[in-house]
């Protein structure tokens, strides 16, 4: 839901006691976004997220066929040369991704700069769709660096050329700094009505997941109050997605001797204390062996009214008829996904301003 919000107001709402700041931010140099400081201690008693229905303030709606997009996140374990040497694995990954309009990829590990372009070429051959990609730099605190990527169907969405960047982290609060991209939907009769949104692709360090989720709460605030375009508007549809390593025990029903519980705000540390933050995945395992909830898609529920209420975990083993060993050759994670309207808040008569209509 696109709104014009002044930077001063956004700082007052989300800036807290000055624990966040922007430094050197220029419209033509987005990579000067800095994250610094420590998230505050929010306190409070954690409560489970609702597992049934939607918040009453944001009723669900049922858009017609073709009026929605599916956004997914997929940690493709060590996605690189070894998998490229197994055509059946690559083709299975292509089949998985072809079910979605945008996929945020984590854990790309290769020194081949053409790896993702070659993968997208194969994806297009198999799917008959026209996907494109944006790939981030190799990042990480060890010699085993990783890349993020966005792979998206160019007939359904487009990415703004000036707003694809990696968040800078001078205090090294994050092992792998998130990759941000600004998207808008295609195929909407009135370009001003298109759903625009920021995606924040992330992969936390499993040993420091809670500390990094505190830092990601700051990243959320920075991205949400980032001025866009000459009108200095801000985008309030900020969707964080990726492998948060929440490690919530989440065995499926009927799994003898294995524990399960719903995700709680406390599991998301600082992210879980953002008012009205909403996780699409709340009580399902997201790893292939179905023992833990690691991955998720998060957004501010009142703002992102474009969410239809539909989403979940894509079970690659059952959907594609794989053995457990075959599924594990693809990844140790399962994709997670959510469905969103192609128009702002599902309203065809909404008048957007500022950067609501992304130039082609």
Image (cartoon, rainbow, N blue to C red):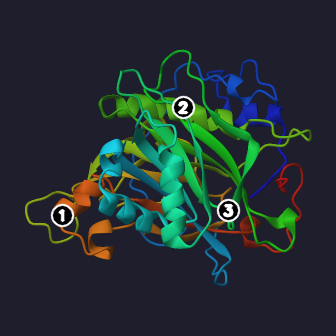
Mark 1 / mark 3, whichever is N-terminal: 3
Q: Secondary structure at mark 1?
A: helix
Q: Are marks 1 and 3 in contact (CB under 8 Å)?
A: no
List the single residue furthest toward the left: 257
Comparing labels 2 and 1, the label whose residue is closer to the camera: 2
Image check: 289 left or right of 210?
A: left
The picture places residue 349, in percent across and down from the top left corner, at 86, 73
- Crowd class of label 1 (few under 14; some 14 to 19; many from 20; radius 10 Å): few
Please state which of residues 293 and 20 is positioned toward the viewer in this rendering. 293
Q: From this view, report whether residue 248 is shown above or below residue 308.
A: above
Q: Residue at x 65, y 44 (%)?
A: 181
The picture places residue 187, in percent across and down from the top left corner, at 76, 72
What residue is shown with label 3?
A: 154
The picture places residue 292, in percent across and down from the top left corner, at 26, 52
Q: Gap in Å between the C-alphas at discs 2 and 3? A: 22 Å
Q: Gap in Å between the C-alphas at discs 2 and 1? A: 32 Å
Quarter-wise, where is residue 157 in the image?
bottom right
What residue is shown with label 1?
A: 324
Quarter-wise, where is residue 43 in the image?
top left
Q: Are marks 2 and 1 in contact (CB under 8 Å)?
A: no
Q: From this view, report whether residue 79 is shown above or below residue 289.
A: above
Image check: 131 left or right of 310?
A: right
Please state which of residues 162 and 295 is positioned toward the viewer in this rendering. 162
What residue is shown with label 2?
A: 137
């Amino acid at each position: 839901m696109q709104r014009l919000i002044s930077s001063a107001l956004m700082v007052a709402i989300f800036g807290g006691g000055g624990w966040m700041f922007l430094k050197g931010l220029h419209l033509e140099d987005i990579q000067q976004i800095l994250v610094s400081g420590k998230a505050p201690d929010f306190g409070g008693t954690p409560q489970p997220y609702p597992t049934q229905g939607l918040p009453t303030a944001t009723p669900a709606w049922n858009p017609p066929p073709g009026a929605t997009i599916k956004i997914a996140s997929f940690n493709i374990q060590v996605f690189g040369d070894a998998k490229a040497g197994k055509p059946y694995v690559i083709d299975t990954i292509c089949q998985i991704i072809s079910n979605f309009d945008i996929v945020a990829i984590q854990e790309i590990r290769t020194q081949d700069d053409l790896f993702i372009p070659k993968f997208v070429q194969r994806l297009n051959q198999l799917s008959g769709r026209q996907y494109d990609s944006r790939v981030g730099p190799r990042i990480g605190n060890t010699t085993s660096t990783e890349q993020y990527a966005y792979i998206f169907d160019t007939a359904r969405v487009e990415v703004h050329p000036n707003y694809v960047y990696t968040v800078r982290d001078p205090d090294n609060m994050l092992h792998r700094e998130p990759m941000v991209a600004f998207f808008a939907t295609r195929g909407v009769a009135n370009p001003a009505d298109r759903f625009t949104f920021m995606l924040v692709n992330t992969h936390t360090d499993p040993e420091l997941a809670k500390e990094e989720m505190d830092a990601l709460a700051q990243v959320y605030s920075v991205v949400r109050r980032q001025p866009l375009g000459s009108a200095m508007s801000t985008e309030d549809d900020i969707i964080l997605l990726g492998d948060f390593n929440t490690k919530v025990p989440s065995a499926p029903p009927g799994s003898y001797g294995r524990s399960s519980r719903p995700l709680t705000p406390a599991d998301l540390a600082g992210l879980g204390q953002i008012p009205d933050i909403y996780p699409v995945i709340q009580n399902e395992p997201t790893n292939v062996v179905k023992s833990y909830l690691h991955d998720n898609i998060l957004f501010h529920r009142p703002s992102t009214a474009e969410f239809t209420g539909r989403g979940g975990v894509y079970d690659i083993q059952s959907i594609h008829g794989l053995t457990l060993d075959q599924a594990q050759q693809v990844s140790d994670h399962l994709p997670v996904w959510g469905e969103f309207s192609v128009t702002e808040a599902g309203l065809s008569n909404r008048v957007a301003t500022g950067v609501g209509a992304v130039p082609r």
